[in-house]
Image (cartoon, grey):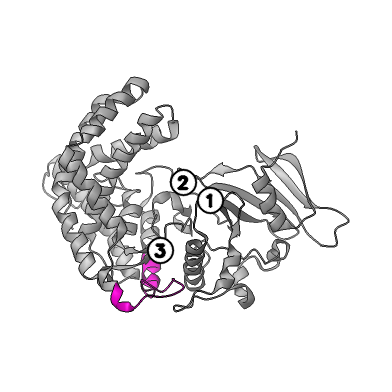
């Protein structure tokens, strides 16, 4: 069977492999794939490649190809990623950030490879292609080095291609399934990332830094967005969302209508209780951004963390990296792993005399989040946020995610991927108890 590559894929592979690559179809581990090789008469010496058919990366719209080199060396693989609607200058700045973190923290940080580097030669030192100083440019905190634009391949359809090592490991598929060692390993890695990222100022990754006094007028757009959306929900008492539930249930009978309505009522209570604390946090960050903000990952939920057994083996997808309140990363990471009232193995409830069920559940959540927090601050002793604020943000973000999913599911009730995600968020909201006090 012949596989016909889309034009934009062919252009990317031509840039990657050279003008004389050939393709033929073939199976690889049960999936449809493409075998890529150079013409035998080519003047270039090049190994064979396997390019697995693309998979869509979650809800982001990005498309991912896995390219494997068939050489006499141990198998090496690359991730070829196509993303629509990314700003190339902004992406180049993020690549600066990734490279600097990779250099300091190690190969578990996903790091772009320069397109000008012949892929065929990378297997010679693939264990760390960045050990070669000519292939690594450290971050210059005062000037954007335009040579790093070669880590980006612009597509005629206004998309961007990125090439990175394929990191080993697998992600946690659902909330509540992570083991304690995995949660603690992630917390330590996130602490290391945030400690290193505190060396980056608001303007450290921009080509023409603005005067430092402008930092005082800066506000975190994500915090402002959360606050604005929460204010609207509280004012309108979730009326739109309640109507959406009825519309979805009429076309998707697998949705538990009673459970969803109860979850929305709980969301309304959480939103009302969270509004004033969020207003205070947003004002606090606005008044002193240098004391509360730094560069961070921006989308540190469990889907972007890879594990080998009990340890983090990779952190992916820095597309939303930015200068913002660091509590977002911790809330997103830990909140996507833990069901609030349930414990992971070895994260047991402290002993107490005949506790009620609700108090026992609160103590379990307290113990689990605190264990993660202690592992985090062991690597980052001067955090720029408080644990209780991260917990509050986790709840707020879960409420807003539920509302966003209801909108998407109303538009397409047959979208099984989003319905499954909606069910997971419903489980998380249903599981909320009293807010645990650290």
In depth, the one of 244 and 433 nearer the eye is: 244
Asked if the residue under mark 2 is in contact with the one under mark 1, i.e. CB atoms within 8 Å, the reply is yes
* Magenta stretch in the rendered image: 191-214
Between disc 2 and disc 3, the foreground one is 2
The residue at which mark 1 appears reads as 83
Residue 428 vertical position relative to residue 103 in the rendered view, above or below: above
**Secondary structure under badge 2?**
loop
State left or right for residue 45 relative to residue 56.
right
State left or right for residue 193 relative to residue 85.
left
Where does residue 116 sit, x and y in percent of width and height? 67, 66
In depth, the one of 121 and 173 nearer the eye is: 121
Quadrant in the rendering for residue 431: top left
| Dot 2 crowding, Cα within 10 Å, few <14, some 14–19, many 20+ | few
The residue at which mark 3 appears reads as 189
In depth, the one of 342 and 418 nearer the eye is: 418
State left or right for residue 38 relative to residue 239.
right
Residue 275 vertical position relative to residue 375 in the rendered view, above or below: above
The residue at which mark 2 appears reads as 60
- The disc, 2 or 3, on the residue closer to the chain's N-terminal end is 2
Q: Residue at x 26, y 43 (%)?
A: 399
Where does residue 370 sit, x and y in percent of width and height? 25, 58
Q: Residue at x 46, y 46 (%)?
A: 60
From where the camera sits, is residue 382 visible? no
Q: CA distance from mark 1 to mark 2?
A: 8 Å
**Secondary structure under badge 1?**
strand
**Secondary structure under badge 3?**
helix
Quadrant in the rendering for residue 25: top right
The quadrant of the picture occupied by the C terminus is bottom left
Where does residue 77 sit, x and y in percent of width and height? 64, 55
In magenta stretch: residue 213: yes
């Amino acid at each position: 069977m012949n596989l016909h590559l889309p034009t934009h894929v062919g252009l990317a592979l031509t840039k990657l492999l050279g003008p004389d690559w050939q393709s033929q179809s073939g199976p690889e581990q049960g999936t449809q794939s493409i075998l890529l090789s150079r013409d035998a008469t080519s003047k270039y010496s090049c190994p064979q490649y396997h390019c697995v058919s693309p998979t869509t990366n979650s809800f982001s719209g990005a498309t991912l190809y896995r390219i494997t080199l068939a050489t006499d060396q141990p198998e090496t693989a690359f991730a070829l990623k196509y993303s629509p609607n990314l700003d190339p200058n902004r992406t180049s700045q993020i690549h600066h950030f990734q490279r600097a973190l990779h250099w300091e923290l190690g190969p578990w940080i996903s790091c772009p490879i320069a397109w000008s580097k012949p892929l065929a030669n990378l297997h010679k030192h693939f264990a760390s292609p960045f050990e070669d100083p000519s292939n690594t440019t450290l971050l210059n905190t005062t000037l954007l080095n335009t040579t790093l634009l070669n880590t980006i391949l612009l597509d005629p359809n206004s998309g961007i291609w990125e090439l990175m090592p394929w990191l080993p490991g697998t992600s946690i598929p659902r909330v509540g399934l992570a083991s304690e060692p995995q949660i603690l390993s992630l917390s330590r890695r996130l602490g290391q990332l945030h400690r290193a990222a505190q060396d980056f100022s608001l303007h450290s990754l921009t080509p023409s830094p603005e005067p430092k006094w402008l930092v005082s007028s800066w506000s975190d757009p994500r915090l402002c967005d959360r606050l604005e959306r929460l204010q609207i929900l509280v004012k309108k008492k979730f009326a739109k969302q309640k109507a959406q539930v009825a519309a979805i249930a009429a076309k998707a009978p697998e949705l538990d209508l009673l459970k969803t309505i109860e979850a929305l009522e709980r969301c309304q209570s959480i939103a009302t209780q969270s509004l004033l604390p969020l207003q205070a946090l947003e004002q606090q960050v606005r008044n002193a951004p240098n004391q509360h903000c730094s560069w961070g990952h921006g989308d540190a939920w469990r889907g972007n963390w890879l594990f080998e057994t009990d340890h983090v083996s990779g952190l992916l997808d820095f597309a939303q990296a930015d200068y913002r309140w660091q509590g977002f990363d911790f809330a997103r990471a830990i909140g996507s792993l833990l069901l609030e009232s349930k414990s992971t193995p070895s994260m047991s409830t402290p002993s107490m005399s005949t506790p009620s069920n609700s108090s026992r559940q609160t103590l379990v959540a307290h113990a689990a989040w605190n264990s993660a927090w202690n592992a985090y601050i062991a690597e980052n002793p001067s955090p720029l946020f408080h644990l209780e604020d991260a917990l509050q943000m986790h709840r707020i973000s879960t409420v807003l995610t539920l509302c966003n999913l209801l909108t998407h599911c109303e538009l397409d009730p047959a979208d099984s991927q989003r319905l499954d995600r909606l069910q997971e968020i419903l489980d998380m909201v249903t599981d909320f108890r009293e807010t645990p006090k650290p």
